[in-house]
Image: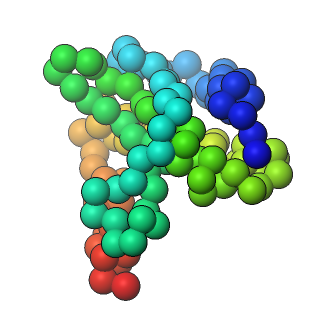
Amino acid sequence: MISIEKTEKILDKIADELPKDFYRDLNGGIILLPEVKLHPKNKSNDLYILGEYHNSVNMGRYITIYYGSFEHVYGHLPQDQFYEKLKKTLLHEFTHHLEFLAGERGLERKDARDLARYLNS
């Protein structure tokens, strides 16, 4: 199991490797929270939220990564695989951010389709 402190270091390394343009108007940055977050529409405590992109009038634009969810879903993985899952999630949330800036909603629609498939399974 990878600690939250180690996860924060890994997340910082991934974030440092991303192009600076990704951070345009992401005034709240990337936040790593300790909690587990279940999707409100989960059917049997099996649909975890790993990360979220936020665009709030009060708080601005920022990305949240949920360490507790990562620990629960991927805590058994070796560090290199955990790293890849964390990177994939961060890039997913950055895609939401960049699409928002461009006026696109492709990933949002894909996420909605994926959720519908889950709910119908």
Give x and y (percent) for residue 5: 70, 25
Tell me where residue 114 sits by quadrant. bottom left
Above or below for 64 versus 69 = above
Residue placed furthest toward the bottom: 121
Q: Could you tell me how many numbered marks the image carries?
A: 0
Q: Nearer the viewer, residue 74 or 100?
A: 74
Residue 59 in the figure: left or right of residue 23: left
Above or below for 105 versus 45 = above
Q: From this viewpoint, is residue 26 visible?
A: yes
Q: Residue at x 30, y 83 (%)?
A: 120
Q: Residue at x 59, y 47 (%)?
A: 70
Tell me where residue 57 sits by quadrant. top left
Give x and y (percent) for residue 4: 66, 31
| Location of the N terminus (image quadrant) | top right
Residue placed furthest toward the left: 57
Q: Nearer the viewer, residue 20 or 67?
A: 67
